Amino acid sequence: MLYRHNITFDNVVSEVEILDTSKCTSGCLYEHIRWGEAFVVVYSVCDRESFREAQELLALIARFKLPSYYTALLLGNQRDLDHIREVCVDDGQEVSLRFGCQFYEVSAAEHCAGVSLAFQWLAREARAGQLLRALPVRRKLGVNSVSKVIGNIFGKNNKSVRKKRPSLSI
């Protein structure tokens, strides 16, 4: 099912197309992944199998798309049914870290505020990605880069090797 809708947030109107692939066979998913820019992968916190399928879908998206060309959201639903929970919050967070996507747990049955916040985040990220991809790529050359290029053009090679200082990232 394809839904087209205009949404307004941050004082900007955006047209979105939402494709529900829940009934889609695995063969047609590739085509949908190719044109998609933002993905919401939903699983039930009460169904371990739906969580496994969500991980497979995130892996498929990561295989077909470059990271800078899509935004993904892992959404655990049915948070209100804690008494029959099969997937803990830590599992969802771990998968979201592995695939570099945002993670939310919501209860669509209790209230729509969590779902709305998740979709607003997704729309903002997708819009930011579109704007960044539309910018022209400019390459800045530093003084060292220019001197290396000139040295390579005129055949001057610097054979001395400088030792790099160790660095520490915290």
Image (cartoon, rainbow, N blue to C red):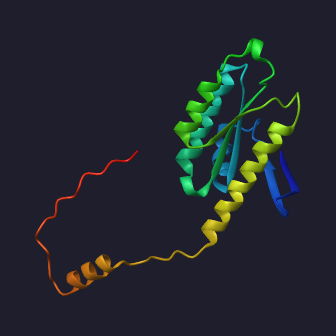
Position of residue 46 relative to residue 163, above or below, is above
Q: In the image shown, does 135 or 5 lie closer to the viewer?
A: 135
Q: Residue furthest left?
A: 159
Q: Quadrant of the C terminus?
A: top left
Q: Position of residue 86 (x, y in %)?
A: 68, 16
**Is residue 52 visible in the rendered structure shown here?**
no
Residue 44 shown left or right of residue 98 in the figure:
right
Q: Residue furthest bottom?
A: 154
Residue 30 shown left or right of residue 1 in the figure:
left
Residue occupying the point 75% across, 41% down: 21
Residue occupying the point 81% across, 56% down: 16
Q: Quadrant of the rendered structure where residue 132 is?
A: bottom right
**Is residue 13 visible in the rendered structure shown here?**
yes
Residue 4 shown left or right of residue 149 in the figure:
right
Q: Position of residue 136 (x, y in %)?
A: 57, 76
Q: Residue furthest top?
A: 83
Q: Position of residue 143 (x, y in %)?
A: 32, 80
Q: In the image shown, does 90 or 164 lie closer to the viewer?
A: 164
Residue occupying the point 79% across, 18% down: 81
Q: Quadrant of the N terminus?
A: top right
Q: Position of residue 12 (x, y in %)?
A: 83, 64
Q: In the image shown, does 117 or 155 lie closer to the viewer?
A: 117
Residue occupying the point 14% across, 75% down: 158
